[in-house]
Image (cartoon, rainbow, N blue to C red):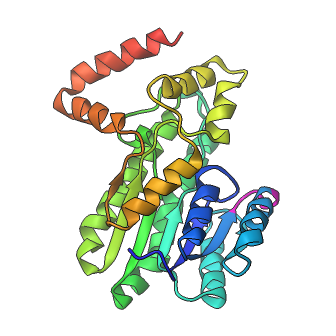
Amino acid sequence: MKIDNSVAIVTGAGGGIGAALCRRLVENGARVVATDLDGERLDKEVAAIRADHPDAIVGIAGDCSATDHIRASIELAESSFGPVDLYAANAGVGGLGENLDSTEEDWQTSIDVNLMAHVRAAKLLVPGWIERGSGHFLSTASAAGLLTQIGSATYSATKHAAVAFAEWLSVTYGDRGVGVSCLCPMGVNTNMLNSGATSDSEIARKSAKAVTEAGMVLEPLEVADMVIEALGTDRFLILPHPDVLEFFRRKASDYDRWLRGMRRYQESLA
């Protein structure tokens, strides 16, 4: 897709990859609606970008998984800039519950934010994109959506679901003007990763260690740069960590061997 003069919505924009995406999109000529559940963090990020690009970004705080908030974000984009060209479903939650101790509430929150937020946004946007013949959906999943996440069943399962939904969107609407990309990073220097590394929970620390020891930890702006490049070529799978592709190939070629290897890796993290 063409970034210059496009209109984008980015969820989870109060920090990390979301804030970095907002900055890079604006720097490449897009106008952006940034949204995050944490209004204070969001205001700081929007103000920092607006200092250099005063007319290119607005913010709206709210729950990315709530249909009313998604609709309000779309309406704000349309009234401020024009029809939405790109929706970056970037917000995510991790570390809710450990192993099989996750509560029903943990599961529901993970499903809502990591999956249903994408579904609800697509339901509101895709029909209009089909009518216009253009539009792009960017799903931030995770390497855990292709592989797995040691320690967190809620995160692993819902990120797999996010990948599957992005695949389905592409298969179903890819020939009708709707572009779809799925971002699956491994270690990124964000609050989500860092909070796990310093958690009082041994399982949370092990989960974070599994990520940091599997490959390099990238900065959010590095990931955003790769996303901008990939959007320009309409690439579906965006893998900032090249090792993920090799891990994915090994998994697909011999599932049982891969599972045994993951169990050994888990034990090595103790």
Where 119 falls versus 194 (above or below)?
Answer: below
The residue lying toward the viewer, choosing from 230 and 155, is 230
Q: Is 52 positioned to the left or the right of 104 in the image?
A: right
Q: Residue at (58%, 48%) from the top-left corner?
A: 220
Q: Residue at (42%, 86%) from the top-left corner?
A: 128
Q: Which residues are magenta?
A: 36-40
Q: Which quadrant of the rendered structure holds the N terminus?
A: bottom left
Q: Does the rendering let one see residue 130?
A: yes
Report how many numbered discs are placed on residues in the image. Answer: 0
Where 202 falls versus 163 (above or below)?
Answer: above
Q: Is 107 positioned to the left or the right of 56 in the image?
A: left
Q: Tell me the quarter of the picture where residue 264 sits.
A: top left
| Image coords of residue 218 (percent x, y) | 53, 39
Q: Tell me the quarter of the picture where residue 105 sits.
A: top right
Q: Does the rendering let one see residue 65?
A: no
Q: Which quadrant of the rendered structure holds the C terminus?
A: top right
The residue sitting at the right extreme is 40
| Image coords of residue 40 (percent x, y) | 82, 58
The residue lying toward the viewer, choosing from 32 and 92, is 32
Asked if residue 219 is among those painted magenta in the image, a careful observer would answer no
Q: Is 223 positioned to the left or the right of 10 in the image?
A: left
Q: Is 67 positioned to the left or the right of 233 in the image?
A: right
| Image coords of residue 248 (percent x, y) | 28, 36
The residue lying toward the viewer, choosing from 227 and 97, is 227
Q: Residue at (27%, 72%) from the top-left corner?
A: 174
